[in-house]
Image: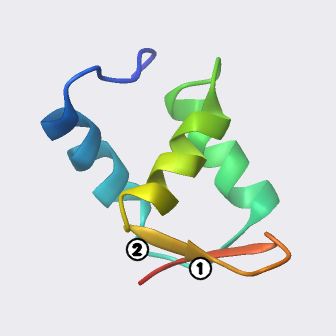
Amino acid sequence: MSKYPAKAKKKIIVLQKIADHVYTEKEINAILKSIYEFDYATLRRELIDYGFMKRSNDCTKYWKE
């Protein structure tokens, strides 16, 4: 996928597929860049905002709630 979906339903599908593992920030960035290289930070933020993932206070670990 080279373009991040605009519709919320499609975003949720993409985000759910990502959020089933504990990742380091480097790992999550690499995965997200492969999905949407132009704004992977938005994907990372939305994983947190939509409640699919949590992150440590120092932002070094990301995991599914």
Q: How is the image coloured?
A: rainbow
Question: The residue under label 1 is which amino acid type?
Answer: Val
Asked whether disc 1 touches disc 2, contact meaning CB atoms under 8 Å apart, the reply is: no
**Quarter of the image where the N terminus is located:** top left
Relative to 23, 48 lies left or right: left
Relative to 20, 43 lies left or right: right
- Give the image location of residue 65, x and y in percent: 41, 84
Query: In this rendering, does residue 33 appear at all?
Result: no
Quarter where residue 25 is shown: bottom right
In this picture, is 18 found above or below 7?
A: below
Q: Residue at x 82, y 72 (%)?
A: 60
Q: Nearer the viewer, residue 45 or 40?
A: 45
In this picture, is 53 found above or below 13?
A: below
Q: Residue at x 47, y 70 (%)?
A: 53
In this picture, is 20 found above or below 15?
A: below
Question: The residue under label 2 is which amino acid type?
Answer: Asp
Q: Which residue is mark 2?
A: 20
Q: Residue at x 78, y 80 (%)?
A: 57
In terms of secondary structure, where does tag 2 sit?
loop
Quarter where residue 41 is shown: top right
Query: How far apart are the two marked residues, 1 and 2, measured between alpha carbons?
Result: 7 Å
- Give the image location of residue 5, x and y in percent: 30, 23
In terms of secondary structure, where does tag 1 sit?
loop
Relative to 8, 41 lies left or right: right
Q: Which residue is mark 1?
A: 22
Give the mark count.
2
Q: Nearer the viewer, residue 51 or 12?
A: 51
Quarter where residue 59 is shown: bottom right
